[in-house]
Image: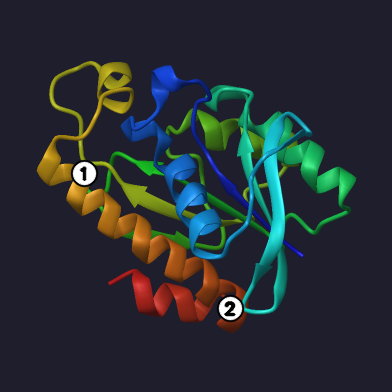
Amino acid sequence: MYIVVGLGNPTMKYSGTKHNVGFDTIDKIAKTYKIKVNEAKHKAMIGKGSIAGQKVMLVKPITFMNLSGEAVRAVVDYYKADSKKDVIIIYDDVSLDIGRLRIRPKGSAGGHNGIKSIIAHLGHEEFNRIRIGIGEKKGDDMVNHVLGHFNRGERKLVDEGIDRAVEAVETIITEGMDAAMNKYNG
C-alpha cells in the first residue's frame, strides 16, 4: 500500500494558501480517483482507495505544518509501511517556479519545516517526494509569502502543477520513481 501525504495547515484560515498545495493535491487525487478523505485518525484526515489497481491511503496531517512528522510517523507505524518505499510526500517549494514539479527519492529538508519534522520523526531523509513550486518570496518575510494566496495567473499555473502532480503519483505507483522523475522533472 502506498501512503500519499499532502502537507498543509488545517482550518479554513489556511485554505488555498501557497503552503497548502500539498493539501490541494490530495484533494485533487481524492476527486480524480473517487477516494473520500473523511476519517480522522493518526493525527490526520485519511482516506483509503486505489490508484491503477494499487491500494493507497491519502493523508492530510492535521497537526499543522511544523509537526507533520507526528502524523506521518503514526500512519507509517500503524500500517507497518516501509517509509523509504511506500511513502510519497507532496509539498510546496519556494525555490521552484510556480507550478513546476521536482520529484526525488530522498534529500534534505531545504528549509521546509514540515519536511524537517518528517525527517526527525522517521529518522532518515529517504522518502519519495513531489515538490510543487510556489515561487520565490518577494522581500524578507517568508511567513507571509507561504501563508499568502496566489493571484489569478499564479493560481492557474499552480493548478496545472497540481494536475501534473496527480499524474506523477500514478506514474510512481505504476512505473516507479525513475519514470516519474524522467517524465515530470523537465
Can you tell which mark lies on residue 90?
A: none
The answer to whether 30 appears left or right of 152 in the picture is right
Is the residue 13 above or below the residue 98 in the image?
above
Between 181 and 35, the residue placed more toward the observer is: 35
Question: Residue placed at 53% from the left, 72% from the top?
Answer: 170
The answer to whether 116 appears left or right of 85 in the picture is left
- Disc 2 target residue: 176
Visible residue check, residue 99? yes
Count the numbered circles shown: 2
Tag 1 secondary structure? helix
Q: Quarter of the image for the N terminus: give it.
A: bottom right
Which percent across, then down, holds residue 138?
13, 26
C-alpha distance separating marks 1 and 2: 29 Å
Dot 1 or dot 2, earlier in sequence: 1
Which percent across, then down, holds residue 29?
51, 58
Which percent across, then down, holds residue 66?
55, 23
Between 21 and 89, the residue placed more toward the observer is: 21
Q: Amino acid at mark 2?
A: Gly
Is the residue 116 above or below the residue 79 in the image?
above
Bin the neighbour count of mark 1 within 10 Å (Cα to Cα): few under 14, some 14-19, many 20 and up. some
Q: Amino acid at mark 1?
A: Arg
Q: Quarter of the image for the C terminus: give it.
A: bottom left
Bin the neighbour count of mark 2 within 10 Å (Cα to Cα): few under 14, some 14-19, many 20 and up. some
Tag 2 secondary structure? loop
- Disc 1 target residue: 155
Question: Residue placed at 63% from the left, 23% from the top?
Answer: 63
**Image quarter for residue 174?**
bottom right
Question: Residue placed at 20% from the left, 29% from the top?
Answer: 137
Visible residue check, residue 129? no
Which percent across, then down, holds residue 111?
43, 32
Q: Are marks 1 and 2 in contact (CB under 8 Å)?
A: no
Q: Which color mode does the image show?
A: rainbow
